[in-house]
Image: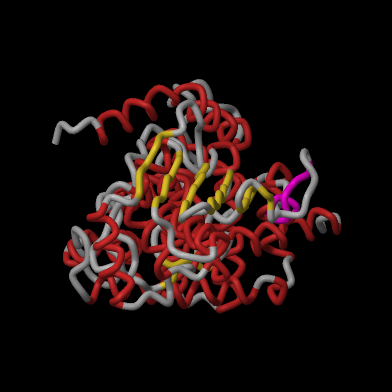
């Protein structure tokens, strides 16, 4: 049954908005983008920088390496390097023009202590407010809800954003209503979509995410999780190990500051890599056509986005789990699995590792990615045998949509205090 045109168009728009190309971990990149725009607004380098942001942002920036920045980490470094070397017009590729002198200047300004960080108490998710001052001039830029949504840009108290109070911003107008997503329509759309409508996004995801995965396996990045996994491969038929190794290797490189771009999913490069690589490697393994690979990637990305709609962009919930589930749903698509098998795969996988915490972006993300793929693969094998975790077993519900909704509730109601505790442990000073 064909989808209505408005639903079809909404799904195309969602993929184009969510499958963006980004360099480095998206949280420090968002800090750098905000700072680069504040510098552009100010018209000169700042004498002081104040970064006000959420606990979720703090934990996701604390330990991850800034791409191309010579090992620099942290909010202060991200803000300073965004100011001295960022190009705000390049959005999530804001730091692609960095030069060695930018890194050295960042280190100097960091040592001078020009940048301060302040927690926005009680504000969940993603929000960044950067205030830059130089002489009598002050620039204030705010990013809210997603990594590129500029909601405030002021110079000396005068707004440079042309919209009236209460109106949505230009970026908010471009943001699709993700509530239209459901697994049944995602599956239908993936079978029917004119691939030309999203071919650019698909090809870029395959090329970029494969390239960084191969880089992670070739060189020593991070904790070398991908390399370790690949060394455990048991023969040519051990596709599960291959899928885990390539996905983890991409994260190894990205979390350690590799400047190679990736295509993200639901605001995260790790999630983009995790969704892409199992589908790509499985398609190679079974000799799937390029068209089947593309359609499977459409489905995998939509399943990942759908899950994160209930969970949110940043939370106490590890996004690698939802991404891994999306990836194995894509694998099931390649196999021609029935909708019932796909639903049951998602249900059982969600009810296995959904308690996995997000304690920020860092090298251990690669191990969580591998664990998520393993759990989702097990759920798929169960589903093919007619088995699933039964409704009423713990948080498991009668159908896939109710289970996805329950996971969202688990995150926002059940894990709210968990999120605060994670942050306290991370910044509490007890190593």
Query: Which percent across, then down, holds residue 164?
Result: 80, 45
Please report the bounds of the magenta region as a residue range.
167-173
How many numbered marks appear?
A: 0
391 in magenta: no
Image-based side of 294 in relation to 282, left or right: right
The residue sitting at 20% across, 66% down in the picture is 227
Q: Quadrant of residue 270?
A: bottom left
Q: Is residue 43 visible?
A: yes
Where in the figure is residue 177, as x and y percent of width and height? 72, 46
Q: Residue furthest right?
A: 5
Where residue 190 appears, x then y in whole percent? Answer: 67, 62
Query: Is the C terminus in the top left, top right, bottom left or bottom right quadrant?
Result: top left
From the viewer's side, name the closer residue of 219 and 97.
97
In the rendered view, would you say 63 is above or below 41? Answer: above
Residue furthest front in the image: 136
Residue found at the very far left of the displayed protein: 431
- Taking the spot 47% from the left edge, 77% from the top edge, the residue there is 207
**Residue 51 percent across, percent down from the top left:** 43, 45
Please, is residue 382 above or below residue 274 in the view? above
Q: Nearer the viewer, residue 323 or 190?
A: 323
The type of colouring in the image is secondary structure
149 left or right of 64?
right
């Amino acid at each position: 049954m064909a989808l209505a045109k408005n639903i079809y168009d909404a799904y195309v728009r969602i993929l184009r908005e969510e499958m963006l190309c980004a360099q480095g971990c998206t949280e420090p990149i968002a800090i750098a983008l905000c700072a680069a725009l504040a510098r552009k607004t100010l018209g000169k380098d700042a004498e002081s920088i104040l970064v006000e942001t959420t606990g979720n942002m703090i934990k996701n920036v604390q330990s991850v390496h800034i791409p191309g920045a010579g090992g620099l980490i942290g909010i202060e470094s991200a803000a300073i390097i965004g100011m001295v070397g960022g190009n705000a017009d390049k959005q999530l590729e804001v730091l692609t023009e960095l030069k060695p002198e930018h890194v050295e200047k960042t280190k100097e300004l960091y040592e001078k202590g020009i940048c301060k960080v302040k927690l926005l108490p009680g504000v969940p998710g993603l929000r960044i407010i950067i205030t830059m001052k130089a002489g009598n001039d002050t620039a204030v830029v705010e990013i809210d809800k997603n990594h590129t949504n500029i909601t405030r840009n002021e110079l000396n108290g005068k707004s440079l954003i042309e919209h009236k109070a209460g109106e949505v911003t230009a970026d908010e107008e471009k943001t699709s209503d993700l509530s239209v997503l459901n697994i049944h329509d995602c599956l239908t759309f993936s079978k029917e979509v004119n691939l030309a409508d999203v071919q650019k996004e698909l090809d870029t995801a395959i090329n970029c995410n494969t390239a960084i995965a191969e880089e992670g396996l070739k060189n020593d990045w991070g904790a070398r999780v991908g390399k370790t996994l690949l060394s455990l491969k048991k023969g040519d038929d051990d596709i599960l190990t291959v899928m885990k190794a390539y996905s983890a290797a991409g994260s190894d490189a990205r979390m350690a500051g590799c400047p190679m771009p990736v295509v993200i999913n639901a605001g995260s490069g790790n999630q983009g890599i995790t969704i892409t690589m199992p589908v790509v490697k499985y398609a190679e393994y079974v000799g799937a056509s390029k068209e089947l690979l593309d359609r499977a990637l459409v489905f995998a990305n939509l399943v990942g986005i759908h899950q994160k709609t209930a969970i949110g962009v940043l939370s106490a919930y590890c996004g690698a789990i939802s991404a891994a589930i999306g990836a194995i749903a894509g694998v099931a698509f390649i196999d021609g699995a029935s909708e019932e098998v796909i639903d049951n795969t998602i249900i059982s996988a969600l009810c296995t590792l959904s308690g996995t915490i997000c304690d920020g972006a860092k090298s251990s993300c690669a191990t969580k990615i591998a664990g998520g793929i393993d759990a989702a693969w097990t759920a798929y094998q169960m589903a093919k045998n007619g088995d699933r975790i039964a409704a009423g077993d713990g948080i498991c519900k009668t159908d896939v949509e109710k289970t996805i909704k329950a996971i969202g509730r688990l995150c926002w109601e059940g894990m709210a205090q968990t999120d605060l505790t994670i942050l306290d442990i991370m910044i509490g000073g007890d190593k």
